[in-house]
Amino acid sequence: MLTRLKVNGFKNLVQVDVRFGPFTCIAGANATGKSNLFDAIGFLSALADHTLIDAASSVRGESGRTADVRSLFHHVGDKHAQEMSFEAEMIVPRTGVDDLGQEAKASITFLRYSLTIARRDGNGGRAADPLEIRKEELVHINQKEATAHLLFPHAAKWRGSAVAGRRTASPFISTVIEGSRPVIKLHQDGRQGRPLLRSAGELPRSVLSAATAAESPTVLMARREMQSWRLLQLEPAALRGPDDFRAPAVLGPDGSHLAAALFHLAHQGRPRPLSSPDTLDFGEEEMQVYAQVANRLSGLIDDVRDITVDEDPKRELFTLIATDHNNTLHPARVLSDGTLRFLALAVLELDPKAEGLICLEEPENGIHPERIPAMLQLLQDIAVDPRGPIGPDNPLRQVIVNTHSPAVVGQVPEDSLLVAETLKTVGETDRFGRVSFACLPGTWREEGAEPVEIVPRGKLLAYLNPIGPPEEEPESGDEGPSKARALVPPKRRVADRPDLQALLPFAEVTGD
C-alpha cells in the first residue's frame, strides 16, 4: 500500500508530495498532469523488476511508448533537468517468496524507499546506458511513528495488522559517497556481517530489483509490493474474448482472462469437471460467487439474473455468460464496454489474492450517469477497509482513479478527492508549469505537519456546476460568424429550457 509519494523532476511533477488513503480520486482537466502521477507510480513499479533503461522505455510518451529517456525528465523548452527523485512510503506484505521460490518474511512492514536517477553527461540521453543511479535507500518507519505517517482515518486493529515487525538499527539499503562516487550498500537483513557494496554508476538496475530472500527478505518484500502497483487499462476486446483452459487464473492489466479468473474464483479448491457439460454440478460456494457478481452487476443493469462461466470441454474454452430475466443468454462478446469493465472490477473485488495498488483512468467511461454511484461504491469496496484488520476477507488493496467527470467529483467521499491543477512557478532562470494536487479544507490531509495546498472554491464549483452560460452572439458589426450563419437563430440548449431551469443546482456559474 502506497501511503505517500514524493516526486521531483519527473515530467511536470516538480516538488510533488501526495498522501494516499485506501481510495483516492484525482480530478483534473486534460493535460494537467494527473496521468503523469500514474506514470511515476508505474515507473517505480517497473524499476522493481527491470533495468533502468527498460523501465524508462515502458513509460508512455505523448505517442505510445517513449524512445528518448530525456522526455521523462522535467524540462522547460529544450532545457532538461539532470536528475529526478522519488520517495515512497509504503506498507509491504509480511511474507512472500523470491524468484527461486524461497520464502521470505519482512522484519518490519512500514518502509520508506528513496531513489535518485540522473542522466549521464555528454550523451544527450541517447546512449545505450543513458541513466545512472545517484542514490538508493530503504529504511524502516517505526510502529510508534506510524500514527504520524498514516493520517487517513483507520482503526488501531487495522494499523496493528498492517504495521508489523521489530525495529531495526540499520537501514536495509543505504548510499554513501566514497571519493566522489556514490556506493550503494545492501545490508543483510537480521544478520551480522559486512554489507554488500555496489558502485552506483555501474549498476544497470536498482539494488532493490535484484533482492532475494537469502540476502534481505525485507528488501524483497518491498520489491514485491512495488511490483504489485499496476495500471488497469481495461480493453473491451480483451474483456470479450473467451479463455483457454490453460489461461492464467488472474485478471490481466488489460482485462484479459476475465472468464478464466471468474471460473477459478468460483471453483477454487474444487477440481474442475472435464467430462461433459452435463456433469457440471455447481456447489453452494460456486453459486455464491456467481450470485455476488450478478448482484453487483444489477446495480448497473436492471435486467440481469445470473452471471456464470460456460465450460466447453471439446474446445477447452471458458466463456462468460450473462442471463437476463427472460432466460436469454448473453455471451461476453455482445455485452457493452461499460458492463464488461464493471464485471472485471466486480471479479477483482471478490478475489482475496488480488492485492496491491490499482490505478484506473476515467472509471466512468461507458457508464450511464445514473449508475456512476454503483461504480464508485464498487471501487471503494475493492480497497481495503481500514476499520478492520487485514485478512483474507479484507486484503491489503488500494485504488487510485483519475477523472475529469463532474458526475464523479460530486459523488466521491470528500476526504478521498484531490484536484490536479497546473500552476505557474518561477524557477531560478525560467517560469514553468507544475502540477499541484490540492485537497478539500477540513479533511485528513490537512492534519500532517507539512502544509498542503487547498482546492480554491471556484475550481471546485467548476465541477459541481459544469453547465455554464450560453455563448454570447456577436453584436452587429463585430467580427463573428459569416452573414449566412448570422441569419440562423441560435439553438436553445437543453439546460436553457424554462421547464428545467428550476431543477438545475445553480442558475449561473459561481466564482470565488
Image (tube, rainbow, N blue to C red):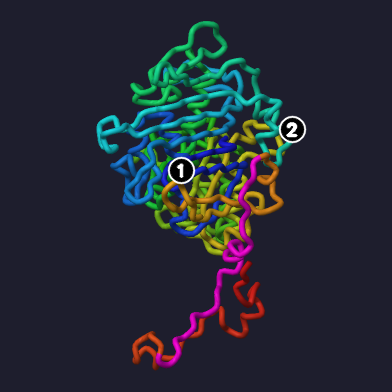
Q: Residue furthest right?
A: 156
Q: Which residues are magenta?
A: 450-477
Q: What residue appears at the point 42 percent right and 48 percent down from the top-left corner?
A: 429
Mark carried by residue 231 = 1
Left or right: where does residue 250 sit relative to residue 129?
right
**Crowd rating for badge 1 (residues with CA inside 10 Å; few <14, some 14–19, many 20+):** some
For the residue marked with disc 2, what is the amino acid? Ala
Horizontal and vertical percent for residue 170?
58, 16
Q: Earlier in the sequence, mark 1 or mark 2?
A: 2
Confirm whether residue 319 shows in the render.
Answer: no
Graded by Cα atoms within 10 Å as few (under 14), some (14 to 19) or many (20 or more), the crowding at tag 2 reads: some
Query: Magenta: predominant secondary structure element?
Result: loop
Kindly indicate the quadrant of the structure image that contains residue 440.
Answer: bottom right
Q: Look at the image and tell me in which quarter the C terminus lies.
A: bottom right
Looking at the rendered structure, which numbered label has been put on residue 156? 2
Check contact, mark 1 vs mark 2: CB within 8 A.
no
SS type, badge 2: helix
Figure quadrant of the N terminus: top right
Looking at the image, residue 89 lies above or below residue 221: below
Amino acid type, mark 1? Leu
- Write the residue at 52% across / 22% down: 96
- Relative to 486, 293 lies left or right: right
Closer to the camera in the image, 408 or 419: 419
- The residue closer to the viewer here, 73 or 206, is 73
Q: Position of residue 397 (x, y in %)?
A: 58, 38
Percent from the top left, x then y, of residue 63? 32, 51
Q: Residue at x 43, y 22 (%)?
A: 207
190 up-or-down from 473: above or below = above
Residue 451 image-quadrant placement: top right
